[in-house]
Amino acid sequence: MFEWLANFGFPTAEQTWTGKTHEDLVASIEELDRVRHDLDYETDGAVIKLNNLALRTQCGATAKAPRWAMAYKFPAEQAVTVLKDIVIQVGRTGALTPVAELEPVFVAGSTVGRATLHNEEEIQRKDIRIGDTVVIEKAGEIIPAVVKVEMDKRPKKTKAFKLSKVCPECGSNAAKDEGEVVWRCPNPDCPAQVRGRLEHWCMRGAMDVDGGGEVLVRQLVANGLALDAGELYELTAEHVAGLERMAEKSAQNFIDGLEKSKLQDLWRGG
């Protein structure tokens, strides 16, 4: 099948493995693990399929996936680095998320300088402190996370981290609902939440507004030009062109992107 596709010019995998036994399968996965870092693309696992079409038909499929194929994920690549600081980010829903500032380290194909710490309880459970030497990995090879602390390398006089219960963006007292682990800023007009909602509105998976990224949204909010999605559609190219790193053409592209987004299904903005 792959040869047939390649003959017609379709891109195919450089190599495939076949086998008849469990031992053949394990050997193929181990070989892929050895060579995957030398491929021209990144991969975090293998897809295992039945080759016999009659067996595929016999196995059938669920509503979501075939029963004749499965994914195998390699263990996430890890690296060791030093945690220099812990900062608090405020998301579009008001969630206060602690983020580790790290000594930059190369892991799973890119240099990582920040990693999520999820929430206060996670920090306490792992006893993560500023100055610690930590093990990080990319969860699903995408999102960096702190896995554990190397306690034998902990500097003296480190202090347990305490999450401030005050929003770092607007100064509101944070609140936590019963049964939840996340502290949230209750102020819907918090600049961080406003930016988060506008960034989400513009992102590709939502209304897909060309040019509506973090840098532009931050300036729109800081200058009071747009504080909700409706106000985005009141902007003109003249409003935007005067902002930093924006010229007449890029400003017009953003306005054109807003106009084009009016054709999107409204549910995408949620």
Image (cartoon, grey):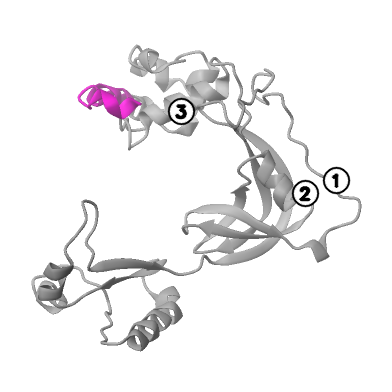
Q: Quadrant of the C terminus?
A: top left
Q: Give left or right: position of 87 versus 30.
A: right
Does the magenta-highlighted stretch encompass residue 228? no
Magenta residues (range): 252-270
Task: Please tell me whether residue 216 is drawn above or below residue 98 in the rendered image.
Answer: above
Q: Give left or right: position of 212 versus 169.
A: left
Q: Residue at x 33, y 37 (%)?
A: 204
Front of the two marks 3 and 1: 1
Mark 3 → mark 1, Cα distance in angstroms: 38 Å
Q: Secondary structure at mark 2?
A: loop
Q: Residue furthest right?
A: 157
| Residue contact between numbered discs 1 and 2, judged by CB atoms under 8 Å | yes
Q: Residue at x 78, y 48 (%)?
A: 130
Pointer 1 or 2: first along the chain: 2
Front of the two marks 3 and 2: 2
Task: Name the chief secondary structure element in magenta.
Answer: helix
Q: Secondary structure at mark 1?
A: loop
Mark 3 → mark 2, Cα distance in angstroms: 34 Å
Q: Give left or right: position of 223 versus 232.
A: right
Amino acid bearing label 3: Leu
x and y, in percent, of residue 263 in the image: 20, 24
Q: Secondary structure at mark 3?
A: helix
Q: Which mark is residue 159?
A: 1
Q: Give left or right: position of 88 versus 111.
A: right
Q: Which of the two residues, 41 or 153, is positioned nearer the viewer here?
A: 153
x and y, in percent, of residue 36 in the image: 41, 75
Q: Which of the two residues, 69 or 229, is positioned nearer the viewer here?
A: 69
Residue identified by numbered label 2? 129
Q: Which mark is residue 216?
A: 3
Task: Please tell me whether residue 124 is drawn above or below residue 57 in the rendered image.
Answer: above
Q: Which of the two residues, 258 or 139, is positioned nearer the viewer here?
A: 139
x and y, in percent, of residue 260 in the image: 23, 26
